[in-house]
Image (cartoon, coloured by chain):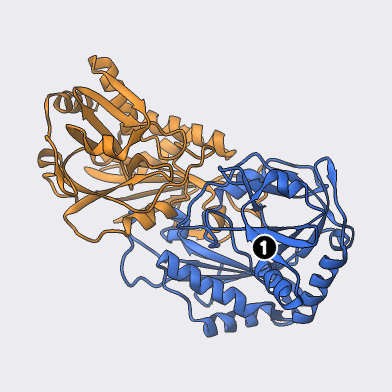
Chain colours: A orange, B blue
Amino acid sequence: MRKTLINGIDTDQLSVYDRSVQYGDGLFETIAVHDGEPRQWQRHMDRLQAGCARLLITPPDPDLLLQQVLSLSQGQRRAVIKIIVSRGIGERGFRISKDIPATIMVTISDWPEYPSDNRSRGVTITSCQTPLARQPRLAGTKHLNRMEQILARAEWTDEGIAEGILCDTGGNVIEGTMSNLFLIHSGVVITPELSHCGVAGTMRQLILEACEDSGIECRVEPVSLTQARDADEIFLTNSLIEVWPVRRWDDKTYTVNGVILTKLKNYINKKH
Amino acid sequence: MRKTLINGIDTDQLSVYDRSVQYGDGLFETIAVHDGEPRQWQRHMDRLQAGCARLLITPPDPDLLLQQVLSLSQGQRRAVIKIIVSRGIGERGFRISKDIPATIMVTISDWPEYPSDNRSRGVTITSCQTPLARQPRLAGTKHLNRMEQILARAEWTDEGIAEGILCDTGGNVIEGTMSNLFLIHSGVVITPELSHCGVAGTMRQLILEACEDSGIECRVEPVSLTQARDADEIFLTNSLIEVWPVRRWDDKTYTVNGVILTKLKNYINKKH
C-alpha cells in the first residue's frame, strides 16, 4: 500500500521540474501512525519548520498538513507517513526564484516488517566504510541529499544485520544509516553531537528529554569509534523503530535492555 | 521552452516514488546544443558512465540516449540538454533494490541569457561562505545532491556578480557554484584537484588536454584561497559558458584574455 497527496491532490505524479528531482532541494519527515494518529506530531513539525528556515524553503501550513496526514491515516492501525517539502518547481539553475510555492508531498505506506524481536532481543549492527562528510550548514537537518546513506546501506546484504554505523570524515561516530546512536557507559547515556553532520532525530530528542526528566546523566559530545564500541550498552532510535538495543556489533556483544534502557523505554511508552 | 522525455516518452510527469525525488539518488549532465548537435557528447557519456559505476546505478544505453537527445535537439540553433539518470522507482528505504531500471529524463530548454560580453570583457565573481563538505566517495561526480550549491548561490543577489567561489571545509578553493576554476600564475595553469569534493567538468577536462597538447605547463593540485586570489589571471569553465575570464574577484582585478587563455580558447574552438 502506498498513496500520496501532492499539494493536497491524490496523485503520485510530480513535475520533473520540481527541485526535489533536479537537486534534492528539500526536506522530509518520517512519522509513525498508530490507530489513525501520527505520533510525535509537534516534534516533527518543529524540526520541519526549523529545517525550512535553515534551507530558505517556504514552510508548509502545519494545520493543512495535519489535515492531509489525518485523511491518509484514517482507519490505519499501523502505517508510515512520509512528508516531503520541496522548494517547488523552478527554472534551470541553482538560483532560488522568489515566491515560488513549496511542493508538499504526503505519502502513506505499509508499516515496515522488521523482525518482531528486534526490540526485545536486540539487533546486530556493522560498521560502514562510507564516511559522512562534515557540512555544518546542513548538519542536523533531514534534507533530501541522501547519497551517503544509500552508499552506506549498499555496503551489506546480510539480512541478519539490522543497521550500519557511520563515522564522519574526522573519524567520529555519528549515527546509523536510518537511526541515531546512543551508548551507555558506566551508567551515563552518551550520544554523538551533530554540529558537523547527521540528522537530529525526533526520537533522539525524546530520549534526551527522558534522561533529563528521569535524572539519568546524559552527555551530547563527540564520540570516537573506540569509545562507542567499548560501551556497556548501545541502542538505536528512530520514529518507526523507536528503540532497538544492540546485541552485537561485528565481533563484540553488549548487554541488552539493562536498567537504564528499560527506564527510558517506559518513559517513551508513557509519552504516547 | 522546456520539454522532457522520461524513458523516451514525451511527458514532464514523474513518479513521486522515483529515488531522485526521495533521496536525490542519481546523476546529471548538462550539455550545450549548437545547430541541433550536442557538444562534447563522448565526454559527457564517459563521465555519466563512470558516475553510474561509482554510484552503483544501472547505466543508460548511450545510443538510445543519443537518439533521444537528437530528436529533442533537431532544428535548435542553441539550446541546453540536461540528462538526469536516477536509480529508478524504489520501495521505502535507502536500500538499493536489485534490477530496477534507471529512470532516464532528457530535457531541452532555452539557451541561458548570459551577458554577451562575459567572454570578451570577463566577469565579476565573489567568495561564498557556504563550504563544500569533503566526501571522497562522491568527489568528482555530477550527482543530484546539490543542496550546497543552492545555499551558496543564495548568498548573492547582485546581478553584476556572475559566479560565487567555494572553498571546502579544509579551506582549499574548489570551484564555482556551476563552474570549474582555473588560475594562471607566472605562465602556469593551475586548477584545484577534486579528490575530496567538486565536480570534474567536461570543459575542465578539455582545458587540461588543451594545455597538454599545446605545451602549456598545467598543474592539478590543492589551491589555497590566497594562492587563487593572487593569480595573474583566473577563468571559469563549464559546458555552456565554455570559458569566462574573471575581471574582478571582490576587490581584486585581473588580466583578461592574456596570451595563454587566448591560445586555450582557440584550441577549444577548433575542437567543436
Picture coordinates of residue A220, whole percent (x, y): 35, 26
Name which residue lies at 40% across and 39% down.
Answer: A199
Any part of residue A40 in sight:
no
In this view, the residue in front, B83 or B109, is B83
A139 over B198 or under it: above or below: above
Image quadrant assignment for residue A65: top left
- Mark 1 secondary-structure assignment: strand
Q: Is residue A161 left or right of residue A41?
A: left
Picture coordinates of residue A31, whole percent (x, y): 33, 40
B146 over B113 or under it: above or below: above
Chain of residue at mark 1: B
Name which residue lies at 23% across and 43% down.
Answer: A78
Name which residue lies at 18% across and 58% down.
Answer: A159
Q: Amino acid at mark 1?
A: Arg
Picture coordinates of residue A151, whole percent (x, y): 38, 57
Classify the position of the C terminus of chain B by image quarter: bottom right
Picture coordinates of residue B87, whole percent (x, y): 42, 66
Any part of residue B148 in sight:
yes
Q: Is residue B67 left or right of residue B188?
A: left
A95 over B155 or under it: above or below: below
Alpha-carbon neighbours of circle 1 within 10 Å: few (<14), some, or many (≥20)? some
B161 over B99 or under it: above or below: above
Residue linked to disc 1: B219
